[in-house]
Amino acid sequence: MKNLLLVIAVAVISAATTTYILTHPIHFDLFGHKLDITDASFAANIYPTGMDNGGDINFPAIMNDDEPHLAGVKNPMNDLFTLAAKKAVPAVVHIKVETESAFNANNNIGNDIFGRNYGTDDIERKPSSSGSGVLVSADGYVMTNNHVVAGGTSIKVTLFDKSVYDALLVGADASTDLAVLKIKPAAIPRSFKYFNFGNSDSLNVGEWVLAVGNPFNLSSTVTAGIVSAKARNINLLDQQNAIEAFIQTDAEVNVGNSGGALVNLEGSLVGITTAIASNSGISEGYSFAIPGNMIRKVYNDIKQYGAVQRAYLGANTRNITPEIAEKNNLPSMNGVYVDYVPPGSTADDAKIKKGDIIIEINGSKVNSVPELQEKIAGFNPGQKISITILRKKETLFLNAILKNIKKETGTINSPIDELRLILGADFETMTPKELSDMGLKSGIRIARVLEDGLLRRTTEIKQGLVVLRINNLPIKSINELAMLIRASKKGDMITFEGIYPGSGQRPKMFPFTME
């Protein structure tokens, strides 16, 4: 009789669960925009998880199916979780960011590139936001999400031991949503607990991982789950050259976990938590993390060059669908379909053609566009790679020397080069005396306006302009300007406010649209 009641109870629960799923359609939404995730079997709203901080440690019970649970018998798997947590927790920090913005008491309001309001009668205020970060060096380098610190003018980092430090933004990469911070040296030097990088490529679906962060202002929360999928593209990053190959897990992650750690059971960093799949903005099942190998490359590049050295294959590619497979008489759905090869691109130099199927990069299989992007992003311009393709049932082995966005094999060395590429102008730092002579506290000078650049085509800006503000935000360094430009999207309206030396005039406004 008991067995019969148990079967009925399980059936009722299963039926109720199925009814709930069928009667609660879920819509995709990201930052308030509708979104389709075509490669997922679920639908949800995707939220970036930057905001606060965490406290409880909850580990799932893990028992072998063939072993009865005995009271007082310690589960040996617990040791793996607790040891990984002990390694991870001291290396995760809470980040608080203050951002200068403004509002207008007379309701003469506009919007800056981050959606904040401002007007001509500005009254300064400093809203704050917060998130998590991970220490990656003993001398205080911290990795976090770009969306946690974007536009910030003051950054404070709180360690596990509750000590608080000021931090500087070293550099950011909007295309991967990553940023590098450096804790300012204190009066008493110290060595920080930090993560070793794990190999995210070796993570397997079904493998246990821990998420460590600061949700809801609860410091150092640890949750556990498994890797649910890899190389997920969820259309989170609204950037022209965005790279999305997220690790999907069912570890519980909430608002404030952005920038926090995803670690394996060895306590090594294999990802940074970035977003959740949710209808409500709180955890409802799935979370997404940037792979650790991508984090390590961005960190090393920004430290060494001041900007990420991004390599591009250059070809337009698509995931293989049943229609593409049938039309091209493909033997399987494996690989990535090449739809177009621009002249002068890496793919063009390698003799890749429209209709080719890319199946391996350096001997590593690729079965989706995000996988291909992730693998290419792991290399630098100038590096040589091997590409295995399928062309009309024939397997070909090609070699390629990767190029950067300018279709060159060299490095982009700094934010100065980045601004030259995007805006078509060279910027330079001003000395304190130069600023003082003009009665200014901050600003950067335009040293040259290129003939074929965006500023020359769309504005009347000339050499010598001292840029004081961009969309009403004060500019204190070239790095700050580069970060704001990176955070903008195609079609955004940008306004430079600046003054020419010796003009004796009020600052002039120079609006233009990002291309």
Image (cartoon, rainbow, N blue to C red):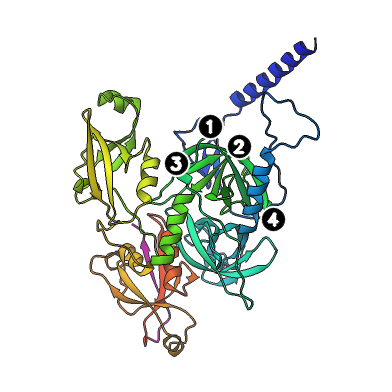
Give the residue at mark 4: 219
Question: Does residue 186 appear left or right of residue 112 in this picture?
Answer: right
Whether the residues at callouts 2 and 3 have beta carbons within 8 Å, the answer is no
**Given this view, does label 1 or label 4 mark the residue nearer the observer?**
4
Measured in 3D between alpha carbons, the distance from the residue under mark 3 to the one under mark 4, in whole angstroms, is: 30 Å
Camera-near label (4 vs 2) is 4
Question: Considering only order in the chain, which callout, 4 or 3, is on the residue closer to the N terminus?
Answer: 4
Between tags 1 and 2, which lies in front? 2
Distance from Cα at disc 1 to Cα at disc 4: 30 Å
Separation of marks 2 and 3 at Cα, in angstroms: 17 Å
Residue 12 falls left or right of residue 93: right
Q: Mark 3 points at which residue?
A: 233
Q: Is residue 359 above or below residue 313?
A: above
Where disc 3 sits, the SS reads loop
As drawn, is 337 to the left or to the right of 106?
left
Secondary structure found at label 4: loop
x and y percentages locating residue 264 in the rendered image: 57, 45
Residue at label 2?
285
Q: How crowded is mark 3: few (under 14 residues within 10 Å), some or many (20 or more)?
A: many
Circles 1 and 2, Cβ within 8 Å, touching? The answer is yes
Q: What element carries label 2?
A: loop
The residue labelled by disc 1 is 42
Q: Which of marks 1 and 4 is nearer the N terminus?
A: 1
**Quarter location, residue 366:** top left
Task: Please tell me whether residue 159 belongs to the stretch shown in magenta.
Answer: no
* Segment tinted magenta in the rendering: 504-515
